[in-house]
Image (cartoon, grey):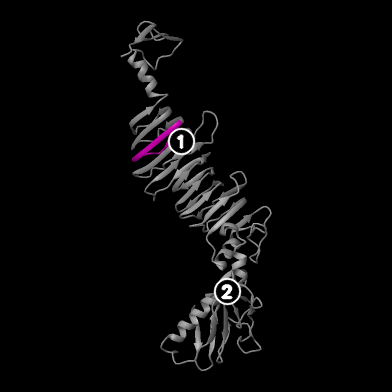
């Protein structure tokens, strides 16, 4: 804290900017951090000659119960909160006498100072923190409530918005973990970077990114759509249109156009599937990112590639179809698995070993038949004597052919 100390009067001035904003005009002061900063101040050269400012007893655990730390200011020191306007400072983290006006510790002005002393009993914060299951703040935008006072944010009393939830996390120094139910709309001023957000289910939890900062955020079991900045990682999500995606996905269902942005070394889509019915397909628009490294592994359903200009693409199908759009003018693609390839572009197809596509065509070619001709009637059988495969096919000028067993 940027504290100031008047050695003549022993007045310690605490600026509002050093406290944590909770909401509105309510701020929180970590009294243990305040104690440490006062210690550092008195240990510095201008003040090393001065008396000790307080008596401190750290938190202790006896028979499994944690008793709160105590901080008692002594030797004529007093505390002033600045500026002298209408705002509130809540004292967190200890039993203390900082709020004691009668004892001359607090210099009262327009600032409301709120103690959280707990009658010499256990560290209430530790018990309250245990109520946040899996150390997560719970947000329910349907049935939650606003505010930051305990027990808001717990499973039984979820918050209804992100701003309050982030304030609770900051004040309690909890991990950046959120459990979500309902629709959470974000804006360009929101920052969920490094947050772990887990939805109740992708049908019950939705995040509309709205241009938010998401760098290194992890989102699971949610419906996700919208633009964002930064690298994001998603799992078990229903993915809508993402106009600016950078990061990875696993076990996701793709229902809209996912447009990539530059900045990642690799884009990975592992064990994902198409959520588009019929002849249409999910779309990955590479957006002309140079030297793309795009890996689509263990994929089910249709997938269309657009705007590949350079780099490498690998697609492994369990079953489905790969469509290379005419906007794909460069780079190299390797396709494998079970399915079909429709190539409308000019990128290099390094290898296409689709079981239901090229391998089937290869069988017809080996029989001396044109795999692209129409088929009006086809019958096949195995010669009982030689074991040769005999195929009779009409429609392409060839009525029969035999593939000899080696």
Residue 327 appears in the figure: no
Disc marking residue 16:
none
Query: From what the image shows, is residue 111 above or below residue 194?
Result: below
Q: Which of marks 2 and 1 is nearer the N terminus?
A: 2
x, y percent for residue 362? 35, 20
Res. 51 visible in picture: yes
Position of 304 relative to 391 (above/below): below
Marks 2/1 in contact by CB < 8 Å: the verdict is no
User: Compared to 290, does 131 lie above or below?
Assistant: below
Q: Position of residue 379 (x, y in %)?
A: 44, 9
What residue did someone put label 1 on? 299
Residue found 51% across the figure and 94% down from its top: 8
Tell me which segment is drawn in magenta: 304-318
User: Going by the image, does 287 lie left or right of 161?
Assistant: left
x then y, percent, for residue 352:
36, 29
Q: Dot 2, how many residues are within 10 Å of its Cα: few (below 14), some (14-19), or many (20+)?
A: many
Residue found at the far front of this picture: 63
**Residue under pointer 2:** 93
Tell me the chief SS of the magenta region.
strand
Q: In the image, what residue occupies the spot 45% across and 29% down?
A: 321
């Amino acid at each position: 804290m940027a504290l100031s100390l008047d050695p003549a009067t022993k007045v310690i001035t605490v600026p509002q900017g050093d406290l944590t904003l909770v909401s509105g005009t309510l701020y929180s002061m970590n009294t243990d951090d305040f104690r440490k900063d006062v210690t550092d101040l008195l240990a510095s050269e201008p003040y090393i000659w001065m008396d000790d400012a307080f008596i401190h007893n750290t938190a202790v655990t006896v028979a499994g119960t944690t008793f709160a730390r105590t901080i008692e200011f002594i030797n004529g020191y007093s505390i002033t909160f600045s500026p002298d306007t209408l705002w509130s400072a809540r004292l967190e983290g200890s039993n203390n006498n900082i709020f004691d006006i009668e004892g001359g510790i607090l210099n009262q002005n327009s600032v409301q100072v709120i103690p959280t002393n707990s009658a010499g009993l256990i560290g209430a914060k530790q018990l309250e923190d245990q109520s946040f299951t899996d150390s997560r703040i719970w947000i329910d935008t349907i049935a939650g409530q606003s505010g930051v006072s305990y027990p808001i944010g717990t499973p039984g009393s979820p918050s209804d918005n992100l701003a309050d939830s982030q304030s609770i996390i900051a004040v309690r120094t909890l991990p950046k973990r959120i459990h979500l139910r309902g629709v959470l709309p974000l804006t360009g001023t929101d920052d969920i970077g490094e947050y772990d957000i887990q939805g109740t289910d992708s049908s019950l939890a939705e995040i509309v990114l709205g241009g938010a900062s998401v760098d290194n955020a992890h989102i699971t079991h949610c419906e996700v759509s919208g633009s964002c900045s930064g690298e994001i990682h998603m799992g078990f999500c229903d993915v809508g249109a993402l106009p600016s995606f950078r990061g990875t996905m696993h076990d996701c269902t793709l229902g809209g156009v996912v447009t990539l942005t530059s900045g990642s070394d690799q884009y990975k889509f592992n064990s994902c599937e198409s959520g588009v019915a019929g002849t249409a397909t999910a779309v990955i628009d590479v957006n002309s990112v140079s030297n793309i490294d795009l890996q689509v592994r263990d994929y089910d359903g249709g997938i269309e590639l657009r705007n590949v200009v350079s780099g490498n693409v690998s697609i492994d199908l369990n079953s489905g179809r790969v469509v290379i759009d005419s906007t794909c003018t460069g780079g190299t693609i390797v396709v494998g698995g079970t399915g079909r390839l429709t190539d409308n572009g000019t990128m290099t197809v390094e290898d296409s070993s689709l079981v239901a596509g090229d391998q089937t065509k290869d069988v017809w070619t080996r029989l001396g038949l044109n795999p692209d001709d129409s088929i009006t009637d086809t019958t096949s059988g195995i010669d009982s004597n030689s074991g040769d495969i005999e195929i009779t096919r009409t429609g392409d000028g060839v009525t029969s052919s035999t593939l000899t067993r080696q």
